[in-house]
Amino acid sequence: MPTERYTAKVAIVGTGAGGATAAAVLARAGVDTILIEQGRYYKPEDHGDILTSMRRMYVNGGMTLALGNPPVPIPLGCAVGGTTIINSSTCFRPPRAKVDHWEGPSWEALEPCLREVETRLHVGPAEESLLGNNYQVLKRGCDKLGIAIRPLAHNLYGCKSSGRCAFGCPTGAKQSTDRTFVPDAIEAGTRLYTEHTVTDVIRKGGRLVGLKGETPSGAFEVYADVIILAMGALTTPAFLLRHRLATGSRRVGRGLRIHPACRVAAEFDEIIDGHVGLPQGACIDHWANRGIMLEGISLPPGPLLSALPGAGARFKELAAHWRQIATFGIMISDTSVGRVMRGIGDSPFTAIYQLNQADTESMRFAMVRLGELYFAAGAKVLYTNALPYPVIRSMDELRKFESCRIRPSGLELMAFHPTGTCAMSATGKTGVVTAGLQAHDMPNLYIMDGSVIPCALGVNPQITIMALAWHGAAQLAAEIGN
Ligand SMILES: Cc1cc2nc3c(=O)[nH]c(=O)nc-3n(C[C@H](O)[C@H](O)[C@H](O)COP(=O)(O)OP(=O)(O)OC[C@H]3O[C@@H](n4cnc5c(N)ncnc54)[C@H](O)[C@@H]3O)c2cc1C
């Protein structure tokens, strides 16, 4: 098999939130940069039907998970744009209290980077006209119970309400990194290599000098003075462990947080058509001080039906009413902590995560509050998918659910925000990278992805990851010049 050889000052692996931002900042500063991505570069018109999109743009077609009881699916993107191409386009700044507490860049240092990122991504609050009935119906319940619900900020430009952010935006309105920082980097001189999967490292005299990997037609090697890993919070630590990089602190792979999530669906007499409008249009942060965020999560009919409970004739009856079903999501700032280990066989990682009882109670608390809002809005039935009350038909049953014994294994969870596995820290004893995202024990290795966030952020993390990468890359550019 032929081996392609590339050289650059900086080689970056991954084109998601962290890697693409770092490439744009470095290239614009005149640094010779290579960007390596295992996935393909899709245009909006390439985004096919939902199953095709999942097969093409999700790692393992969406079948990635953390082992535990329950196991938690954690979908990841595999394309230019990384997970940003399949995300819900919700944008939050990191909470100030978290930034003040972490051993990373100060708020004063990070804030200009947040502004740069937000400007480039056209971040702004969603117009109410885009939010659809899924929002309107819950707002009715919120207004009755005096709870605030508000439109979320998004990175959208000219949204046409296609209702399928998580399967690739078919109109190109979502300002994911494939449409922003990757083109910026290429315009400034970055060379992008797609369908290049990094599998190994190249060392010379004990020093990391490059990476090697596979393409559909052969092999490649890339030699660089500085290497930036931005493969995501599950893959990067597993890669470090497999190749014994930056493992001096013994913190690599530890500290996994995922923001465990679930949803409550509610059946109404009226037509909701939740798939029309922004899937994650609005949020309720009334219980944020308990680590609970409620955020919209409407699904197209296929995924919606596969997420509802039941079988046989009863399920058929429920499916016939799919247009009357509203859904909203719940996300917890987890106190549970998981771990990433090197993958077994060819698998890029093994993740282990066991939800603890405190987080289980928080999840139940949030489901009950959401149920109250839906009943206040006029819902007939709630679908929690949580044992022992997967279906709830009255306030009485909701109260029983509130006080029954509940176990983590009785919940059906998902998660979308892995972080924490190569945490920023002041010293190599407590974390893996510095505030500038340089490995404590390997000066020419940087990590610029979700793994450096050292805590459960409490809000969706893409803007934080981009701002941290911007900050780290700007510092690196100043150090190495061109
Ligand atoms: C369905 C869904 C919805 C979400 N919604 C939101 C949201 O609304 N708002 C928000 O803030 N966050 C959201 N997120 C999370 C957010 O998108 C991620 O936190 C963020 O993209 C992570 O950035 P990253 O740089 O760590 O990794 P990623 O964006 O995952 O990028 C990693 C990149 O590395 C590449 N890669 C991995 N291994 C290799 C290898 N061996 N060789 C070459 N390339 C490799 C991958 O293909 C990928 O392109 C969502 C996530 C999901 C799954």
Image: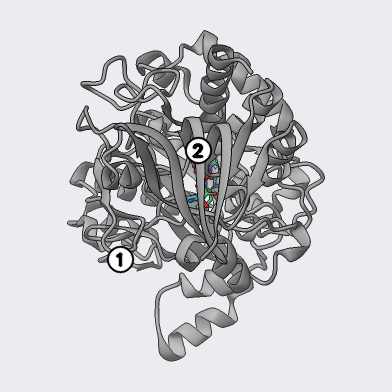
Identify which residue is drawn at 40% across, 30% down.
453
Q: Position of residue 9 (x, y in %)?
A: 56, 28
Quadrant containing the C terminus is top right
Identify which residue is drawn at 34% across, 46% down.
239
Identify which residue is drawn at 27% across, 40% down.
253
Q: Secondary structure at mark 1?
A: loop
Horizontally, residue 373 falls left or right of residue 408, namely right
Tag 1 residue: 389
Q: Is residue 28 above or below residue 164?
A: above
Q: Given the current orientation, which residue lies at the most extreme bottom position? A: 313
Q: Amino acid at mark 2?
A: Tyr
Q: Secondary structure at mark 2?
A: strand
Within the image, what quadrant is residue 202 found in?
top left
Mark number, residue 198:
none
Horizontally, residue 220 falls left or right of residue 163, namely left
Q: Neighbour class for label 2 at 10 Å: few (<14), some, many (≥20)? A: many
Q: Amino acid at mark 1?
A: Tyr
Q: Position of residue 445 (x, y in %)?
A: 41, 29
